[in-house]
Amino acid sequence: MPDKIALKEKREIAKQRAEELKGRIEPYLQAKEEIPDGMKEWDIIFERQEKIKKHFGVDDSEWNDWRWQVTRRIYRVETLVKLLGLAQEEAENIKKVGESYRWAVSPYYLSLIDPNNSRCPIRMQAIPSFEELMDNGGKDDPMGEEFTSPAPGITRRYPDRLIINVTNQCAMYCRHCQRRRNIGEVDRGTPREQLQAALNYVRQNEEIRDVLLTGGDALMLNNDLIDWLLTELDNIPHVEIKRLGTRALVTMPMRVTDELCKILERHAPIYINAQFNHPMEVTPAVAEACMKLTRAGVALGNQAVLLAGINDTAHIMKKLNHNLLKILVRPYYIFHAKAVKGTAHFRTRVDAGIAIMEELRGFTSGLAIPTFIVNAPDGYGKTPMLPEYLVSMARDSISIRTWENRIMKYENKD
Ligand code: SF4
């Protein structure tokens, strides 16, 4: 733009540009009002919670006790029929799916389901669907995790970090779970000897600076065990940070007790990665849990999974990420769903994810833009998928494509 333009004229240009930018956000502003939102629908969710409490004959103190939520996970079709008013055919289908794939839902997560909407994004993640039995194409372990476990309980795919699998338990068994082969029929904590073996592996490999405790769900461990594991890791000089992988923050926010927060605060630096997939999952109860964790010095991130019919549009992803930022959870990754057996109905094309990224970059704050990831086959690692912004590269300049599709030259000199 030429420099010699009067200030008044510059202001006019800026005003026109501002109008143009307003136009760019208009479609989202209209669409977002239609997207179910756990904050706005809390009154309705609360009414459903009252119904569930009445069904179990409990009061708030039991409802808010995570152990009660775990022991009262709903895994009988008869209970679902009563609480969601399922049709006979659907109930029969759930029974059939249950013979092949385990399912269970925490009473809290069940309360987020809209019983009048068969395509409710919460319901689709929680309640078995006959489509699970129609998928014979996927693999049990497309990431080849079994080939990346150099010691019991360890998954290692990168030079300086690894996973310790601490349990196979979860507050809910997600229908899209990418590790469903680990879930099994019974809850199994990793035996103490196996945890010791995994810790020994970390001790013996000094390049490991970052350890992720996951499973299953790391917050399904009791507080004493979490404290012990974090203490052991703190005593390994080369471990710089600890991470916990959990969906309990989403499916059972009452797991975030004051006692847990005190433990995590003692073992800083701690990072928690959750898995929020839809704005309906971001509720006042979740916000309170996130605030407690943040006050305890825990940094929160989100790893969404791109799921057909649930969050495979830019508007839903944008709203999810905005709602997460409001509760101090940084959108970190969006994973392309792998070809795990029984989950084909959730899988999108990779281009669907790239199209979402295209509609996020520039259209919203960089903080609200996670990295879209394809997990390479056979455990060769997370691979970022990006829209193309570099059009060409010459000796002294490059040609770039902006978020609004303007092709521009950019100097690239020594
Ligand atoms: S919480 Fe995670 S590991 Fe557990 S069922 Fe859901 S996706 Fe799978």
Image: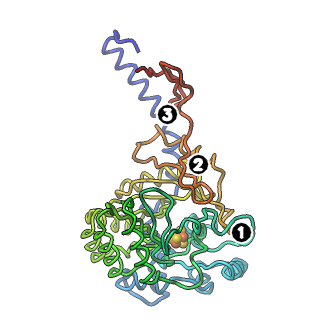
Q: Are marks 2 and 3 in contact (CB under 8 Å)?
A: no
Point out which mark residue 353 bears: 2
- Estimate the x, y position of residue 365 in percent, counting from the top left: 41, 42
Q: Which of marks 1 and 2 is nearer the N terminus?
A: 1
Q: Nearer the viewer, mark 1 or mark 2?
A: 2
Question: Residue beneath label 1, please?
Answer: 131
Q: Which colour scheme is used?
A: rainbow
Tag 3 secondary structure: helix
Where, by quadrant of the figure, is residue 4 drawn? top left
Q: Which of marks 3 and 1 is nearer the N terminus?
A: 3
| Camera-nearest residue between 92 and 150 | 150
| Camera-nearest residue between 412 and 119 | 412
What's the amino acid at mark 2?
A: Gly
Question: Given the current orientation, which residue lies at the most extreme bottom position?
Answer: 57
Neighbour tally class for label 1: few under 14, some 14-19, many 20 plus, Cα within 10 Å: some
Question: How far separated are the C-alphas under marks 2 and 3?
Answer: 24 Å
What's the amino acid at mark 1?
A: Glu
- Estimate the x, y position of residue 126 in percent, counting from the top left: 57, 72
Point out which mark residue 23 bears: 3
From the viewer's perspective, tell me whether residue 18 is left or right of residue 343: left
Where, by quadrant of the figure, is residue 13 drawn? top left
